[in-house]
């Protein structure tokens, strides 16, 4: 008899299955739900992901960006107690690169320092760049849209709330 039931989160993580039961495959984008923001990673197989984060993101200037690093870690360690899913939704918009190319490209960047910027180059930009060759972040686009609306309509409190939520713990 197994210690984990097939519906337990630990079993799903060990089997690399997301919250909906979909199994992650090499080259898939993994979206991790952190509450006010989502962290993104690239699944490379055998329970590992490669992701980009900035441990000191909160102490740096949002206009300059801060030092970030590309990391290879166990999916289970990155996810922790949060929920996650395979999210290749931009496949409708862009043709993904071949899986082996995505994995090779992501692996070649492990340990590399890059500039992390909340709206210009964050974990989602990194992940989409690996899969599609195009760095995009829907979260960043949402922040920029809200910021533009605030500039026009003077709703700075809402912008501060959205940016604060995305910035809080924005490393991973």
Image: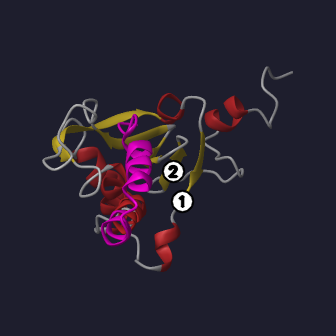
Specify the color scheme. Answer: secondary structure
Quarter of the image that includes the N terminus? top right
Q: Quadrant of the C terminus?
A: top left
Left or right relative to 12: residue 27: left
From the viewer's perspective, is 63 left or right of 6?
A: left
User: Residue drawn at (29%, 45%), measured in percent from left and top?
Assistant: 107
Q: Which mark is residue 87?
A: 1
Circle 2 SS class: strand
Query: Around disc 2, counting alpha carbons within 10 Å, would you say few (fewer than 14), some (14 to 19), or many (20 or more)?
Result: many
Q: Is there a contact, CB below 8 Å, between mark 1 and mark 2?
A: yes
The vertical placement of 145 against 42, above or below, is below
Instruction: Judge by depth and name the residue closer to the eye, 65 or 79.
Output: 65
- How many marks the image carries: the answer is 2
Q: Is residue 87 above or below residue 4?
A: below
State the residue in front, 166 or 10.
166
Residue at the spot of label 2 = 31
Residue 146 horizontal/vertical position (percent):
40, 64
Residue at the extreme front: 154
Where does the image place residue 171, in percent across and percent down from the top left?
35, 36
Per the image, label 1 sits on a secondary structure element best described as: loop
- Residue 153 in magenta? yes
Magenta extent: 147-172
Spot the residue most to the left: 64
Specify the farthest residue to the right.
Answer: 1
Of 151 and 96, the residue lying toward us:
151
Residue in the foreground of this view, choosing between 91 and 36: 36
Q: Is residue 97 above or below residue 105?
A: below
Assign the magenta stretch its main secondary structure.
Answer: helix
Q: Is residue 163 visible?
A: yes
Q: Position of residue 44 (x, y in %)?
A: 43, 47
Is 63 within the magenta?
Answer: no
């Amino acid at each position: 008899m197994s210690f984990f039931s097939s519906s337990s989160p630990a079993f799903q993580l060990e089997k690399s299955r997301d919250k909906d039961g979909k199994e992650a495959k090499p080259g898939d984008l993994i979206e991790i739900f952190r509450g006010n923001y989502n962290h993104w990673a690239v699944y490379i197989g055998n329970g590992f992901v490669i992701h980009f984060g900035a441990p000191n993101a909160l102490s740096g200037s949002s206009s300059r960006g801060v030092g970030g690093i590309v990391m290879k870690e166990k999916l289970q360690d990155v996810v922790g107690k949060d929920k996650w899913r395979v999210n290749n939704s931009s496949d409708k918009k862009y043709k993904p690169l071949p899986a082996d190319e995505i994995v090779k490209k992501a692996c070649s960047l492990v340990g590399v320092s890059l500039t992390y910027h909340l709206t210009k180059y964050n974990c989602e930009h990194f992940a989409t760049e690996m899969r599609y060759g195009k760095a995009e972040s829907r979260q960043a686009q949402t922040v920029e849209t809200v910021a533009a609306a605030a500039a026009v309509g003077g709703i700075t409190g809402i912008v501060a709330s959205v940016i604060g939520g995305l910035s809080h713990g924005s490393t991973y």
